[in-house]
Amino acid sequence: MLLTGRYAAAEKVILVCDNRNTHTFGAFYEAFDPATARSLVRRLEIRHTPKHGSWLNVAECELSAMARQCVHGRRFGTLDELRAETTAWQVHTNDRQRGVEWQFRIDDARVKLKSLYPKLGL
């Protein structure tokens, strides 16, 4: 676990995640004994991405596409072979420069997500 390994010395860790119902402090209490969960939760700050148009959604879509197009149903003999295949897929995908077609217009977002936009004292 990263909190007890790589980030063991960190006083606080900010965890960025989407709005799934499993991404809560309560999940720690389901996975660990109460004392362990409490010690982990005290060091965490959860920041949720917006529900609509989240960069995390784009990342999840790309990972899903890579899994389907590049690695699904295949076996790789070494980690280097896997890296070579996924790197080739990444280069090919980036060369095509696909964009994300958001279904949310900026004006709609400003109304629907007004709580996320800063209030300017004009």
Image (cartoon, rainbow, N blue to C red):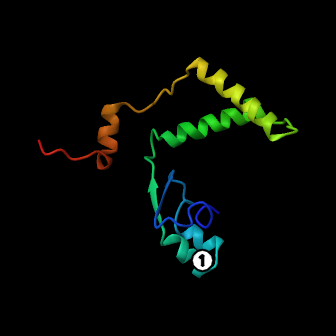
Task: Tell me how many marks there are.
Answer: 1
Looking at the image, residue 26 lies above or below residue 97: below
Give the residue displayed 58% in from the left and 67% down from the top: 27
Q: Mark 1 is on which residue type?
A: Thr
Q: Is residue 53 left or right of residue 64?
A: left
Q: Is residue 106 left or right of residue 36?
A: left
Q: Quadrant of the N terminus?
A: bottom right
Give the residue displayed 60% in from the left and 36% down from the top: 61
Looking at the image, residue 15 lies above or below residue 73: below
Give the residue displayed 46% in from the left and 67% down from the top: 11
User: Which residue sits furthest bottom?
Assistant: 35
Q: Which residue is mark 1?
A: 36
Mark 1 nearby-residue class (10 Å; few <14, some 14–19, many ≥20) = few
User: Which residue sits furthest front?
Assistant: 9
User: Which residue sits furthest top?
Assistant: 96
Snapshot quadrant of residue 77: top right
On the image, the x and y values in percent for residue 41 come to 51, 70
Q: Is residue 49 left or right of residue 112?
A: right
On the image, the x and y values in percent for residue 104 come to 41, 33
Q: Looking at this view, is 84 or 112 the one in front? A: 84
Snapshot quadrant of residue 33: bottom right
Give the residue displayed 59% in from the left and 74% down from the top: 29
Q: Is residue 30 left or right of residue 80?
A: left
Q: Quadrant of the C terminus?
A: top left
- The secondary element bearing badge 1 is classed as helix
Looking at the image, residue 40 lies above or below residue 98: below
On the image, the x and y values in percent for residue 68 come to 73, 33
Snapshot quadrant of residue 70: top right
On the image, the x and y values in percent for residue 42 come to 48, 72
